Every structure is written in C-alpha cells, then in structure tokens.
Amino acid sequence: MGFRFPGKFTAKQGAEARNVPKGYLAVYVGEAQKKRFMVPISYLKSPSFQNLLIQAEEEFGFDHPMGGLTIPCTEEAFIDATRSLNSL
C-alpha cells in the first residue's frame, strides 16, 4: 500500500526518494551548501538525534527548503553528533 501526495514531489525528488535504502532516511545537512546523508531510522530514538530534530523544527517547521528533512548545523557538527550513534 502506498501513499500519493499530488503536487508535492517533483520527478527528481521521487527518484532520490527511491535511492534511500530500507530502514534509512535521508537528511540534508550544512549551512550554505547542503549535503545529503543517509541515517538509520534507529537514530530517531536517540536523545542526541532528537535534539537535532528539535533544532530543525524550530528553524524550518514543516517547510524544509530541500524538500526533505533539513538539519540546521554544520556537516562537522552532524558527523560528531552521529559518530557516537554509529557504535550502538
């Protein structure tokens, strides 16, 4: 069963969405230039990742400029925050 969102996604966004492996989600990170990262959905229950999501909500609400989840921090800060999660 699938969901359709008419007028919400472009063909390019749809193609990118299909490139996300099962069990992962795509996030965009960076200040000026955004870089796409694949993160395991298990990160969603981590308090440090939840803090990043709270920052994203405060800055963007539900209107993310990249069409996907955008985390408002530097790549280095994101990598540092998720590095400890990789060992879980």
Image (cartoon, helix red, strand yellow):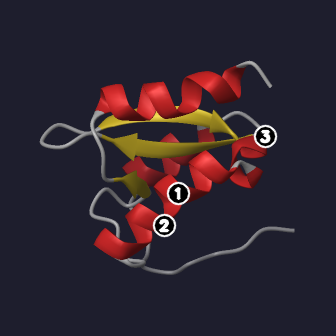
Which callout, 1 or 3, points to the residue nearer the camera?
1
- Label 1 – label 3 distance at C-alpha: 21 Å
Q: Residue at x 63, y 25 (%)?
A: 84
Amino acid type, residue under disc 3 in the picture: Gly
- The circle on residue 54 is 2
Relative to the observer, which residue lies in front, 46 or 3?
Answer: 46
Assess whether mark 3 and mark 2 are in contact (beta carbons under 8 angstroms). Answer: no
Q: Which mark is residue 23?
A: 3
Q: Quadrant of residue 19?
A: top right
In the figure, is residue 39 to the left or right of 51? Answer: right
Secondary structure found at label 2: helix
Q: Which residue is mark 1?
A: 51
* Mark 1, other Cα within 10 Å: few <14 / some 14–19 / many ≥20: few
Tell me whether circle 1 and circle 2 mark residues in contact (CB < 8 Å). Answer: yes
Marks 2/3: CA–CA distance:
21 Å
Is tag 1's residue or tag 3's residue first in the polypeptide sequence?
Answer: 3
